[in-house]
Image: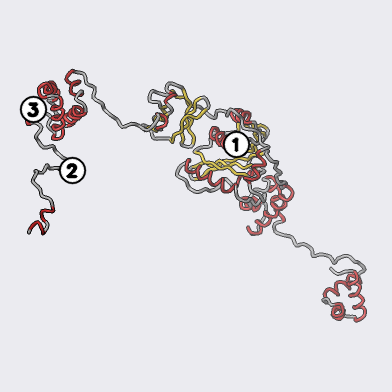
Amino acid sequence: MKSARERMDMIAAYLDVGSYRGAAAICGTTHRTVKAEVLRHLGGSEAQSPKRTERTKNTDIVAEVVARRVRRTQGRISAKRLLPEARAAGYSGSARNFRRLVAKAKRDWRADHHRGRRPGVWAPGETLVIDWGAEDGLHIFCAVSAWSRWRFVRFAADERAETTFSMLAACFEALGGVPKVVLADRMGCLKAGVVANVVVPTPAYVRFAAAYGFRPDFCEGHDPASKGIVEHLVGPQAPFIDVPTANRAAASWGEEVNGAYHSEICAVPAERLETERALFNPLPSLRPAIGKRLTRKVDRLSCVRFGSARYSVPMRLIGKVVEVCVTDGVVRVVHLGAEMARHDVVAPGEASVADEHYGGPRPTPRRAPRPRSASEHALIGLGEAGLAFLKGAAAAGATKLGSELAGIVALEATYGREALIGALERATAFGRWRLGDLRSILDAGAGLPTPRGPGEALIVALPTVPVRPLSDYAPEAVR
């Protein structure tokens, strides 16, 4: 655009030299610019030269049809779907040219019908945003404290209402308080219905919210941007074998990211949470029961049964009715609001036993003999020798022991108690279990050698011989 002074200079130069090129050389512009300005001046009008007339386009015949269809479908119809209708209306141009017409019609419609948005403004202690996702068969529960950007991620096997309530309760415990509002999308487990675009929460969710003291809120339908602060957490995760392993990894990840610098708020979420925690509602002193509680009576083995498996509890609870809660592969036994035992889930038919529930580790099984007859009492009365002989004979399958037992204990009256005990020890060492064997040992007397185990030293009594002092062997004594 030329200024008024430049236009006047071009006209004066033309009137002075009489040629467009000469005036252009004087004014430092092109001869076409000088010609246009001189013709405009000689014509007596300062207006711009008339524009080129627009040529008709082959899409003009269907422009109204396209605009009407785009308006009716709110800018969602495709050119491919609309092209047959345009052909029927008389359009004979190319598909490419028609796609340009549809794209322009969509842009024009969206320019007048876009959804204006404004950035979210969060207050401390106000809003917790939650959402569910799924990856590799595991369901991912994500929550973000909107102001501090503190993140909470856990894994579960399903997205039922009881599971969601448990995740929310765990999140509140980790937060150290309860935010005033919990914002969720229109989850089927929390939504009882929709009336005039207003979500009606389920009665269970209302009771849970009343127990913890927060207000349930729901975002617009099909509008993830209204809670986009949590959407980026619900994405692909590392593969995990089971839920407990995944939750341990999620807890470690949460400590790491919540302690790192956040670029959006230019602060550390864990530090901002400390400031925000003072504004949370306090946790209820009595936590509400979540989901269906299973009750079991503790049996005489101090165990409860669940899923055809046994789980031990302290012995003082024998005969009491307790509650059994199973979450994330962990069985919790609760009595009067206090956790009494915690076990990992085991397969049906197995048992999970904790030694501390029974006062210590399991003792080694010991099958003590219980004598009934007088002969049995007499044999056991001989002490360790009689007990060892009895167990050895039973282990060797001595079937005549019962009938010969009276004769064995009668040997005490003939040979004496000490001799019989020694004979029993020798019979046990050599594996001789009959009455005749014991009589042979007693008749042989005590002069028989005592058997020794491998590696044991055998001390033999040496004969006594006369000795002389070393002085007798001195040279002087020899001479």
Residue 186 horizontal/vertical position (percent): 61, 37
Whole-percent x, y for residue 8 in the image? 91, 72
Q: Quadrant of the C terminus?
A: bottom left
- Which corner quadrant holds the N terminus? bottom right
Q: CA distance from mark 2 to mark 3?
A: 28 Å
Q: Earlier in the sequence, mark 1 or mark 2?
A: 1
- Residue type (three-letter) at the residue carrying disc 2: Glu
In this picture, residue 18 sits left or right of residue 402: right
Q: How many marks?
A: 3
Label 3, on which residue? Answer: 439
Is 472 displayed left or right of 165 in the figure? left
| Residue 229 visible | no
Q: Which tag is nearer the camera, tag 1 or tag 3?
A: 3
Q: Is residue 216 left or right of residue 161?
A: right
Residue at x 57%, y 29% (from the top left corner): 287
Above or below, comparing residue 469 to residue 172 in the picture:
below
Looking at the picture, which amino acid does disc 1 mark?
A: Phe
Cα gap from disc 1 to disc 3, whole angstroms: 83 Å
Residue under label 2, please give it.
Answer: 456
Instruction: Determine the secondary structure under disc 3.
Output: helix
Which of disc 3 and disc 2 is earlier in sequence?
3
Res 148 visible = yes
Residue designated by label 1: 172
Spatial separation of the CA atoms under disc 1 and disc 2: 71 Å
